[in-house]
Amino acid sequence: MKLYYAPGACSLAVHIVAREADLPISLEKVDLATSKTESGVDFKTVNKKGYVPALSLPDGDVMTEVGVLVQYLGDSSPAAQLVPANGTLPRYRLQEWLTFISSEVHKGFSPLWNPATPDAAKQGAKDKLAQRFAYLDEVLAKTPYLMGSQFTVADAYLFTVVNWVNFLGIDITPFANIKAFLERVSARPKVREALAAEGLLPQAA
Ligand SMILES: N[C@@H](CCC(=O)N[C@@H](CS)C(=O)NCC(=O)O)C(=O)O
């Protein structure tokens, strides 16, 4: 399987899950500005939607959408316990989290990445994100991970998108439990491997 990714983008969630699940995947970096991959392929021929992540499956088909890809990889490695069993109530709870993260957090950041967004709209996006963070902070005050003591694919997704505060200069200190969550997840050996592979850890001198 090959994961098309951009360093630190939402594709990192899929990358983390692949490593946590001990699934062998190869990585192909995509330059989102030019839509070219590192081996010179026009990325639009891989994913017509033009965005990462895209996962090329063993049969050559391509699958997209973070919330689906993380479940697909989690289901491919049951021993890693990254997803509750299909058809159970906890699985719907996981999907509830994945949908919340996708629509309320991930896409809540979008205006902040766009240099053309007017300042007032940026402030509005930050205020809405702060509401979502307040809710997440309450949840994470009670449990180390979203679904309890077990790390799941939802945590990989939440970590990936909330970690963008560090690139956007958003102060997360009012949300101490989210801050602790980011530190907890980033300390996981497989997460560190993924961050290092994407060039997101400071290089040793
Ligand atoms: N609905 C998609 C959204 C993916 C997405 O927003 N990808 C961003 C990076 S985090 C991207 O590649 N943006 C470039 C573009 O939209 O052209 C998913 O959940 O996978």
Image (tube, rainbow, N blue to C red):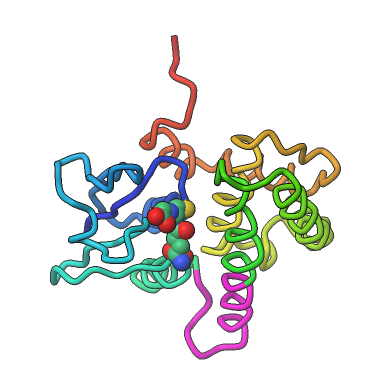
Residue 92 is drawn in which quadrant?
bottom right
Which residue ends up furthest to the top in the rendered image?
Answer: 205
- The image quadrant where one finds ligand 1 is bottom left
Q: Is residue 80 magenta?
A: no
Residue 173 is drawn in which quadrant?
top right
Q: Is residue 80 visible?
A: no
Q: Is residue 90 above or below residue 63?
A: below
* Residue 129 placement (x, y as % from top left): 74, 56
Residue 3 is drawn in which quadrant?
bottom left
Q: Is residue 96 magenta?
A: yes
Q: Quick one: 37 or 99, which is closer to the camera?
A: 37
* Residue 132 placement (x, y as % from top left): 76, 61
Residue depicted at 64% across the width and 59% down the height: 108
**Which quadrant, please, contains the C terminus?**
top left
Residue depicted at 84% across the width and 60% down the height: 138
Task: Specify whether 114 is left or right of 148.
Answer: left
* Residue 199 placement (x, y as % from top left): 40, 31
Q: Quick one: 76 or 162, which is closer to the camera?
A: 162
State the extent of the magenta-drawn residues as a range.
Answer: 83-99
Q: Is residue 73 visible?
A: yes
Task: Specify whether 172 is left or right of 70.
Answer: right
* Residue 87 placement (x, y as % from top left): 51, 90
Task: Specify whether 149 is left or right of 20.
Answer: right
Residue depicted at 68% across the width and 33% down the height: 169
Task: Determine the main secondary structure of the stretch shown in magenta.
Answer: helix
Residue depicted at 53% across the width and 77% down the height: 84
**Which quadrant, please, contains the N terminus?**
bottom left
Task: Specify whether 160 is left or right of 73.
Answer: right
Q: Quick one: 86 or 57, which is closer to the camera?
A: 57
